[in-house]
Image (cartoon, helix red, strand yellow):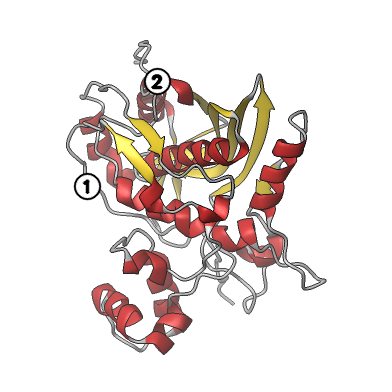
Amino acid sequence: MTINKTHPEYQYLNLLQEILDHGFRKVDRGTGDASFSLFGKQMRFDLAKGFPLLTTKRVYWKGVLYELFWFMKGLTNIKYLLDHNVHIWDDYPYKIYLAKNPKIKLSKEEFVAKLVVDKRFGDKWGELPRIYGQMWRAWPTKSGQPIDQLKWAIREITEDSSCHNAIVTSWNPEYLYTMATPENTSYFPICHNLYQLNVIDNKVSLHLYQRSADLFLGVPFNIASYALLAHLIAQVTGYEVGELVHTFGDVHIYEMHLDQVKEQLKRQPKSLPKIKIHNQTKDIDKLEPEDVELINYQPHEPIRAKLSVSGGYFAKKK
């Protein structure tokens, strides 16, 4: 049953319901986690009419904020997140650590604590090379001269509002999945893999393509993160903020999240919050998390769920 209502959050709720009703069951070959999937869906948010931070459950705003700045700073080690008590990326380094050290018995809590206090250990095992930040800000090239895609895209739309080419990608086949060699693989998946900036009527819009989307747990973060990125880019370019267009490849609900989804669907959306940026800089590198204020966010209570660390490099059995 599709709910036809005008609040923009119903796009998300309707998609949850559509997957419950019509999703195709799949099983991840690496983790064994099952999900229900649809393919090729889209949502659109007019960012001038409110900031699309979901209200039918509380979204971890601090995590959204510091994760985006982790990306924007081009960082690849989760130490930046841990220093701000943000733990949303703990699972993937821990998964890699266990895969490479099968005989060492270290709990995730012990692993994370050691990342913080042991610099040598943290430098090695907290690192996620070729994660979004590096690909946005220092794309590796054969010449050895990295490419700052984010700054280039901002410059393109600033100098030429009619440009059609302001694309930032994180998808490099050399390091991903079974395209990669075991020594070069990044191990973890790149999910929100490409976005494009476009200016129409003096408004900058951002179109995100997400090839794989955990609709219950991950997508609320992704919506808010890229909406915030659009606001920050509007700030430094001098344009007004336009739309966030969010296009999905495989969008899914994990079987382990079905009860939580059904609980969320019982709730009615509330008024969307607003975003205010206090730093008027025109340099994206001079913005900091403290410059961003979230105003009037009054959501329903959070709904807890376990993260599935599915995807990424799969070692075939010989």
Nearest the camera: 230 or 110? Answer: 230
Give x and y (percent) for residue 25: 43, 40
54 to 99, vertically: above or below:
above
Instruction: Tell me if 12 is positioned left or right of 198 in this view.
Output: left
Position of the C terminus, as image quadrant, is bottom right
Q: Which residue position is annotated with label 1?
A: 304
The disc at residue 8 is 2
Is 284 left or right of 222, judged from the image as shown?
A: right
- Residue at 22% across / 38% down in the picture? 259
User: In the figure, residue 288 lies in which quadrant?
Assistant: bottom left
Residue 295's image quarter?
top left
Visible residue check, residue 90: no
Closest to the camera, between mark 1 and mark 2, is: 2
Q: Residue furthest right?
A: 143
Vertical placement of residue 176 versus 223, above or below: below
Task: Identify the mark nearer the N-term, 1 or 2.
Answer: 2
Above/below status of 315 relative to 215? below
Element on which disc 2 rests: loop
For the residues bearing labels 1 and 2, Cβ distance under 8 angstroms: no
Residue at left offset 25%, top offset 49%: 305
Q: Is residue 259 visible?
A: yes
Q: Secondary structure at mark 1?
A: loop
Looking at the image, residue 206 sits to the left or right of residue 31; the answer is right
Name the residue type under label 2.
Pro
Left or right of 34, for residue 114: left
The N terminus lies in which quarter of the figure? top left
The type of residue carrying mark 1 is Arg
- Residue 147 percent location from the top left of the image: 72, 60
The crowd level at tag 2 (other Cα within 10 Å; few <14, some 14-19, many 20+) is some
Q: In the picture, residue 155 is in which quadrant?
A: top right
Q: Position of residue 289 (x, y in %)?
A: 39, 52
